[in-house]
Image (cartoon, rainbow, N blue to C red):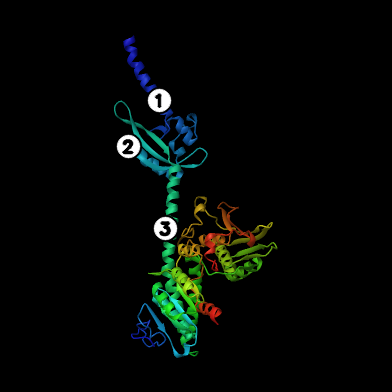
Amino acid sequence: MDRERTPVSATEEAAFRLAAIVESSDDAIVAKNLDGIVTNWNHAAVKLFGYFPEEIIGQSILTIIPSELHGEEREILRKIRSGEKIEHYETQRVRKDGQSIEVSLTISPIRDRNGNVIGSSKIARDISQRKKMERLLIRTEKIAATGRMAALIAHEINNPLDSVLNLVYLARTTVRANDPALQYLVTAEKELVRVSHIARKTLGYYRDPGTPVEIRLEEMFEEILTAWNAKLVSRHISVDCEYQHHDPLFSNKDDLIQIFLNLISNAVDAMPQGGTIKITTHQQGNSGIEIVIRDSGVGIQANVLENVFDAFFTTKGQSGTGIGLWVARHLAERHGGSISLSSQTETPVNGTTVKLFFPFQENVPAKEDRSAQRRMQTA
Amino acid sequence: MLANSSLSIWASDPGFNGIKDVEIDSAREQSKESTLNQPTVLVVDDEELIARTMGEILRRAGFKTLIAFDGSAALELALRSNPAFVLTDVVMPKMNGVELAIAIRNALPKTEVVLLSGQAGITDILEDGHGRGYSFELIAKPVHPEKILERIRRALC
């Protein structure tokens, strides 16, 4: 009896030990048959995917695979059936609570005594954090590269523009008053002034020293909206403004106009089928003024919201330059202000809300980089 | 006229007289009878086209104009001619605009210096000057020439 029992008990012990190893693994270990039905589910799988064994065993593995990746599972099963192993395959899975996670998978065929493939074991490791870090690094690199590129472009564009401005000015002041070329030169000069203005705003980290002027937000918005009127009417966009009387705000008018122009331009582009832009201004005690611009447009997908202030990031495809919000934030911060954005894509609450805050002059913190931009006297 | 050789800034437009008599030198003087009693303005830029066109604009506006294409040539020229106003680029070979401005301010305290730059990332150069107790007005390129004229007239006229 002992002789017969010993080998059985050794096998049992080995199986028990193996099960204990699987159960205590930090990596999720899951087994499934060739139809993709879950047959085993360890403790780490519970932690990773949120399902208890009794909830998932007997269910399809597709339960944890995002619907757009179901095709991927068919390919995995095909490889497993032919005896192939899949190592360190990075993909996405979905937790019971709906949260998407990034995992690295190693999938091996399980064979019976005769060597026939009867299923597969899947070891899944959560790499969400690593992926997040990788994306942050890429983003940091991208921002740094963008900065380098902007500096390079600034030099390569601003200098020739300066020359051309001088040349056109010389030409315009050289031709006789009755010369038909005069009108062309006048127009060319105006256009150059416009381009120069944009180049200075976007391609320089400093600007002309300007004395802050008193800003009347109501008047400023009316001015901007008048300029947009034709487009607003043709796009069936109505504008609803609610201005609160505010204490004097001193800032750079051109910069503020640029910010609001960029934001209203985004709002208009977000509403190809028409809609409403709501602009409200609200004084926040003695600290400053909050300005909210809300559109009823298509909204911005949650997964790209964090990128909208990056340079050269656009949700407008070919028609966007990707610098509108970047410039808006840059200019707002230059004046001690802040800008934030929230968005909804689900109807009927769809739309994007941009909140700006500008402190009153006495509350603007002194900034090192601003000191260089201002006209300075010898210390 | 000091010019011993001349070059039009537009090789393809030799008929333009305004800047035809420009000496190809790292530093040179454009002077005309009519500007002898006018204050002297020194324009410094390693982008020769900018220096030449700005020089011409100022000359037409009635200023006696000097141009230089690098900082050290500009300093030499400034010490020789004591300009009333210096308009200088910031990033230049040999001596940058801030170093030039500091040297001019020390040697010629009555001379007004304004910096002009089209480059981002010059904060370090400006901060360096600031750290040494100097600060200068900075105008961003591209700038309409009338703004420059207005600025110079404000200082000199």
Q: Is mark 2 on a helix, strand or loop?
A: loop
Q: What residue type is labelled 2?
A: Lys
Tell me the residue at 54%/63% (across/down): A371
Let me know if marks 2 and 3 both belong to one chain: yes
Let me know if marks 1 and 2 both belong to one chain: yes
Tell me the residue at 66%/63% (across/down): A241
Name the residue beneath numbered marker 2: A85
Q: Distance between the residues labelled 1 and 3?
A: 51 Å
Query: Residue A255's spot in the image, x, y percent?
Result: 56, 66
| Chain of the residue on which disc 3 is drawn | A
Q: How far apart are marks 2 and 3 (CA)?
A: 39 Å
Let me know if marks 1 and 3 both belong to one chain: yes
Q: Which of A214 and B5 is in front in this view?
A: B5
Quarter of the image that includes the C terminus of chain A: bottom right
- Disc 1: CA contacts within 10 A as few (<14), some (14-19) or many (>=20): few
Badge 1 or badge 3: first in the primary sequence: 1
Name the residue beneath numbered marker 1: A19
Can residue A58 be seen here? The reply is no
Tell me the residue at 42%/51% (across/down): A138
Count of marks, rendered view: 3
Badge 1 or badge 2: first in the primary sequence: 1
Q: What element carries label 1?
A: helix
Q: Which residue lies furthest to the front in this view?
A: B107
Name the residue beneath numbered marker 3: A145
Q: Distance between the residues labelled 1 and 2?
A: 21 Å
Quarter of the image that includes the N terminus of chain A: top left
